[in-house]
Amino acid sequence: MSHIRGKNTKIEVLVRSYLFRRGLRFRKNDKRYPGHPDIVLPKWRTMVFVNGCFWHMHEGCTKFSMPKSNVEFWTAKLVRNHDRDIRQHAELEAAGWKVLVVWECELSKARREETLDQLYRQIVGMDGTNPVNRGDDR
């Protein structure tokens, strides 16, 4: 467990390098915001969280299962993580940010390109929704 990192994980680096190649500029792991978002795109008023399926209780995912030993500890910890994520995302949305979540399972080789392309379209407003009002904060 001591080797598990909280930032600059392989999946975070994968998402960041894709967005950078597509021309998006961002801040990473910005501590000024609730939840310390993995990627902050101020120009697009968007924050991206790259979540591991186990640590953030991705419901319905094969990569998430409750551990069989020390059940009380893990249940309390994972539920606390999940509830905290929901609360922090609500705070960010109330402050006018668009919050996007990319799950670890969505970045498997079979789904990676589709997921990353969809993420890019969501950020720049090409997914059928209205683009985010960028104002003068570029």
Image: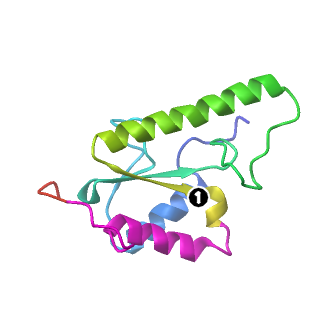
Display coloring: rainbow
The question of residue 24 being in magenta is answered with no
Q: Closest to the observer: 54 or 132?
A: 132
Image quadrant holding the N terminus, namely top right
Q: Residues within 10 Å of mark 1 (few under 14, many from 20)?
A: some
Total label count? 1
| Three-letter residue code for mark 1 | Ile
| 16 to the left or right of 1 | left
In this rendering, is residue 19 above or below 81? below
Residue 83 horizontal/vertical position (percent): 56, 33
Residue 127 horizontal/vertical position (percent): 39, 72
Q: Residue lying furthest left in this view?
A: 136
In this rendering, is residue 32 above or below 132? above
From which residue to which does the magenta span run? 108-133
Residue 35 in sight in this render: no
Q: Residue lying furthest right in this view?
A: 68
| 35 to the left or right of 109 | left
The residue that appears at 36% across and 64% down in the rendered structure is: 123
Image quadrant holding the C terminus, namely bottom left
Residue placed under numbered mark 1 in the picture: 11
The residue that appears at 65% across and 31% down in the rendered structure is: 79
Residue 24 in sight in this render: yes
The question of residue 124 being in magenta is answered with yes
| 100 to the left or right of 23 | right
Residue 67 horizontal/vertical position (percent): 83, 37
Q: Which quadrant would residue 2 be assigned to in this image?
A: top right
Residue 90 horizontal/vertical position (percent): 41, 39
Query: What is the secondary structure assignment of the residue under circle 1?
Result: helix
In this rendering, is residue 70 above or below 49? above
